[in-house]
Image: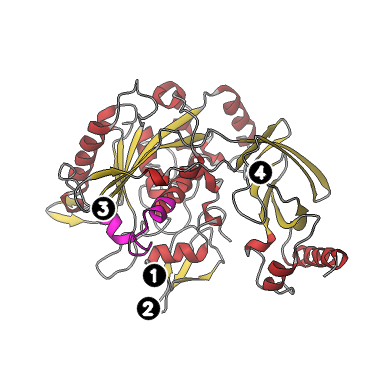
Amino acid sequence: MSSLLRLMLIVLLNEVYARMIPDTEVILLPVWDLKGAREIPLTFKAFGQIIQLNLRRNDNMVSPQFQVWKHNANDIMEELPQLNAPNPCYYLHKSPAGSAAISFCQQHGLHGLVFLENATLEITPLRNGFAPSALLVNDRYVKQEVNLPLGEPHVVKRSPPRLSVDPDFEMHRHRIRDTQENLVLELAVFFDEAAYRLFSPFLDEDDEKIRDMLLAYVNGIQALYHHPSLGVSIDISLIRLDIIQRQPFDLPHFGGERGNLLDSFCNYANARNPPENDRSRHWDIGLYVTGLDLYAVENGRRNGATMGLATVGGICIPRYSCVIAELGVTDQLGKPYPSAGFTSVYIAAHEIGHNLGMPHDSSDNACPRDGYIMSPSRGVRGETIWSACSRQVAETLSQTKICLLDQPEPRNASNDHSRYRDLPGREWNAKRQCELLLRDKDADVVTLHEACQSLQCETPHRSGYYFAGPALDGTL
């Protein structure tokens, strides 16, 4: 096919996209052979506007001291250094006119976000399969035939900034950003035996796939702590990941009884957390991710409504800087709880919020009981933003929780949850989120309608529909 005909195909695709999907264009971007280049200039035109980016490689993603450990089936703790390979393909742009985060990690194009004063542009390669199935042009044909010397076709989607939390939010956000110290939450994640047994068969007994799932999980938490409704941006730096194939004798789980398990984990994590003067390996919060159905004993009866637990305000206090959260849990009939799939990132963010000092909404404060991340109960719809009460706590963290002011050393990209660019739904698409929810590779999404409220899933092996909670950011 001649270059002219290929170019005509791009024009046709652009017209089809414009009619089918508002605020979407198809553009050509150059193909890069990076080889670790420190700087990349990138200029393109979208929606009638010339965008000029001066991209610099992001070398501050995961500490070089980041460690992945496994407590194996032989009751031996071993490091997994093969999971620590660097991948220098993440770039950032900052200027008074806006900012951008761009990834060149995958073949056939780039992924990323460009934040302008009045809009956000999301860029993905056309041949990555993000085109709507209803396109008049055959997707296989596009992938095989569109190989222009002028560059690769990319989809650019425009959306307005999500800054309408309250009328004064934009001005307030800028004031905070200009005056607050940079907040960094250094995190260690412990993936327990019960969770390992749930997910390892689904992930082909592959520790690298488990690591990648947990990076997407942590990145989902990160996206919530970058949400503008919080008022401040809190970066998460992953310091350590423990994959527990066999539960250590000094980490009893008490069958999921929440109080005893939290105490057990806090003791275990505190004994292993290096002192604060060892800044390269010390973490601010330990997160215990469990496949157990947490419960409490109330009036002599077992109450399984608990999905996580933390000490309010415990961060920066070694004995109490620890939280527990469910992942992958179902009821006795196999029906998923809200913590079964990626909705669990809200559970973890909620418990971390407690550890930062946030109480429940409506608990001795004027915020509504329902509708926000710190609501006292959680379903599978909505509750995806922070309340004004949570924001008030977050705005004082630089004065009240000074351990968050420690800055980590430069990070290693291969183990970095931020490689998902706060869009873990790009890698963990709707089908994969349904597969994870039901731990069934035949599971699929029913519809993307209202997916931002709750993703609807089904499987040929069970009757009925199942809801995974709000889809991950970036889900198509």
Where is mark 1, residue-wise?
A: 440
- What range of the chain is rendered magenta? 194-212
**Label placed on residue 46:** none
**Label placed on residue 461:** 2
Dot 1 and dot 2 residues touching (CB under 8 Å): yes
Residue type indicated by callout 4: Leu
Q: How many residues crowd around disc 1 within 10 Å: few (fewer than 14), some, or many (20 or more)? A: some
Work out whether mark 4 precedes mark 2 in sequence or the reverse, and give the earlier one.
Answer: 4
Closer-to-camera residue (275/87): 87
Q: Nearer the viewer, mark 4 or mark 2?
A: 4
Where is mark 3, residue-wise?
A: 245
Work out whether mark 1 precedes mark 2 in sequence or the reverse, and give the earlier one.
Answer: 1
Against 168, is 379 above or below?
below
Where is mark 4, residue-wise?
A: 34
Secondary structure beneath dot 4 equals: loop
Secondary structure beneath dot 2 equals: loop
Q: Nearer the viewer, mark 3 or mark 4?
A: 4
- Give the distance between the C-alpha atoms of the residues marked 4 and 2, in whole angstroms: 45 Å
Work out whether mark 4 precedes mark 1 in sequence or the reverse, and give the earlier one.
Answer: 4
Residue 372 can be seen in this image: no
- Give the distance between the C-alpha atoms of the residues marked 3 and 2, in whole angstroms: 28 Å
Whole-percent x, y for residue 96 in the image: 72, 30
Residue 198 is a magenta residue: yes
Q: In the current view of this chain or complex, which residue is farthest to the right? A: 4
Secondary structure beneath dot 1 equals: loop
Q: Quadrant of the N terminus?
A: bottom right
The answer to whether 97 appears left or right of 444 in the picture is right
Q: Which image quarter: residue 107?
A: bottom right
